[in-house]
Every structure is written in structure tokens, then in C-alpha cells.
Amino acid sequence: MRRATGATRATRSAGATGATRRSPATRAARALGLGAAAGTAWLLWRRLTEAPISLGGRVVVITGGSRGLGLVLAREFAAHGCRLAICARDAEELERARRDLVERGADVYAAVCDVADEPRVRAFLSDVVARYGRVDVLVNNAGIIQVGPLETMSAQDFRHALDVNFFGALHTTLAVMPLMIRRHAGRIVNITSIGGKVAVPHLLPYDCAKFAAVALSEGTRAELARHGIKVTTVVPGLMRTGSPPNALFKGKASLEYTWFALGDATPLTATSAERAARRIVEATRRGEAEVTLTWQARALRLVAGVLPGALADGLGAVNRLLPEPGGIGSAQLRGRDVANALTRSPVTALLRRAARRNNELAAPSA
């Protein structure tokens, strides 16, 4: 009896050990099952609650709508039958954009407005409501980009980036929010950047401002959902909008412009602005939470999530390949002023074509 009891105990012990050994796999399987069930429930909930809206007749406000991605987005929304309100800082540039849109059959209101100036933003949006009666969609697209090593950047450069890229979006959001809450409807689309998810070397003021813009976008989506307002965070990689001639460069400005322009110039490294605009408009229509544009940006986000340390070290290696801080010191120049033989060569033909098409070549006011 004792032997049997010992054997029984041994068997029980072995069974318990086996169960213990199997338990991590069992727990993993259960976790996967729960995850799959939760994912399925979330997709069903999205299908029921996030039915695409029709854009025909909607009033769409686009900041920075006079050139680049903003102008391409305005064209795409106009093609869907939207009524447009665009703003920018340069009056001549804005008028060219307005004529471009009118020639395409758009109903468009254009006004000079610096989004960093909160009173002017509120006045602009008040004029939009006076003209159209409401704002259905706000696209926070206005932005600046400063390129150069950290050693060449001042605190003022960081403040300037935050004023436009973050506070500009905050000013417009706070202005339209009460209007949308009263109607229990609305869309807010924030054009951020992969630089708002991964800090890219030689773009630190831009990176910091875009990180803040991502936080604003994600937070407002959570808080405004109960009011029927959908907020979409757009995270683009490189796009051929034609914008490098208007970017701001410090340090060895011509060399900085060269690497920046080349990255923006080919189908292998950058998607077309038109393709990006179509995807953004569709995300707006569907009220999607977040859209990452380009496979390169998606890959960077994946590596950042899985191997953040390795990515940081890799970016440090990339930084060693970029121009050193010497040269013109703290002077800041626009890309069009530091172009060189390589940036005027056939290698950048697609970039220059996009710049002509998207109103990027005219000199903005100071």
C-alpha cells in the first residue's frame, strides 16, 4: 500500500509538474485567443460605429493650403465635392492656389493667416463660419521644417517649430471644437510625421514639435469621441510634395539640402503627394484613428517598437554620415537658395516637377 501510495504520489507529482510545464503554453494560447476575440470585437465595433461619411457639400478647412501637400489635399477634397477654406501666410502664393482650385470648379475661400497667431486663427475661422455656416472637417497641415545639426539650432528654432507645428494645430482645434461639439459631429485631421514617432537626426526642432502634435492628436481623439468627433492622426514618411525648396537649412546648408532633397526625389524613397492625399481623404471619410504613409515609415515604427535601442544606435550611425556643423554657422537659408548641380540634375526631376505643380517655387514673404 505504501509503495502504491508512493507511486501514486509520484504520478501525481509528475502530472502536476507536467501541468506546470504546460501552463505557459496554455496561458499563451489563451492570451492569443482572447486577443483574437478582442480584435474581432473591435473590428465589428468599428464597422458599426465608423461608417464612412459622404464628403459632398462638406466644409473643409485646410491650414497651409496654398502649396505642397495642403494644396494637393485641397484639390482632392474639391474632387469629392467639398467646399473649401484655405489659409497661409503669403498672400500672392495663396491667390495662386485659390485660382488653381477655382479653375478646377471648387468653391473656395482663401485668407491670409499665420496659425501661430491665435487671435488671427479665431478670426479666420469666424469668417469661414460666416460664409459657410459651419466647419465639418479641419485639416491641420500647416508646418515648417528646419534641417541641420543640433549644434546649429537655437532655442528660438525650437520655439518657432512648436509655434507653427504644435500650437498652430492647437489653436485651430480649440477654435472649431465648440462648433463641432454643438453639432455632435466633425472630423479633425492632423498631419504629423514619422518624425513625430522616431527622432530623425538633423531634424530635432521638427521632431520635437511633431511628437507634441502626435500627443495632441491622439489625446483629442480619446476626449472628443463622446461628442461624435473623429480625430485622425496622419503619420507620413517622405512625400514628393515639392517642399524642399521652402525648407529651412542651417550649418553646411547646401550639403544639408542635398541629402534632404535626394531623399524626397525618387519613387524608391518617397510616395507621390497625390497618392498620399487620396489615402488621407479616405481616412477622413472613414474617421480612422491613425494612418501611417509609406512602407519606410511603417518599417521605422516597427523597429522602434521592437528594438528601440538598436534603432537609436542605428540613427547615431546615420548621423555620422550627415554633414558636420561647420560652414555658415547659425545662418538659416531656404533650400532654393542653396541648390547645387546635383539638386538641379535629372536625379531630382520628379521633385522639381512636383514643386512646379504644387506652387512650391514662388518666394514666400518673410
Image (tube, rainbow, N blue to C red):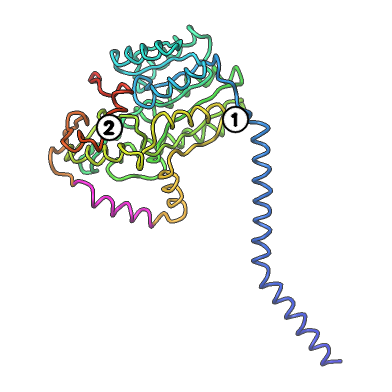
Badge 1 density bin: few <14, some 14–19, many ≥20, Cα 10 Å: some
Residue projecting furthest to the left:
327
Q: Is residue 347 above or below residue 66?
A: below
The answer to if 357 sits in the magenta stretch is: no
The residue indicated by pointer 1 is: 225
The residue indicated by pointer 2 is: 244
Question: Amino acid under label 2?
Answer: Pro
Which segment is the magenta one?
Answer: 310-323
Classify the position of the N terminus by image quarter: bottom right
Classify the position of the C terminus by image quarter: top left
Residue 76: image tag: none
Give the residue displayed 37% in from the left and 22% down from the top: 64
Q: Nearer the viewer, residue 136 or 223?
A: 136
The answer to if 322 sits in the magenta stretch is: yes
Q: Nearer the viewer, residue 265 or 206?
A: 265
First in sequence, mark 1 or 2: give its number: 1
Question: Amino acid under label 1?
Answer: Ala
Label 1, label 2: how far apart the Cα atoms are: 36 Å
Which of discs 1 and 2 lies nearer the camera? The answer is 2
Q: Is residue 316 left or right of residue 308?
A: left
Q: Is residue 23 above or below residue 251?
A: below
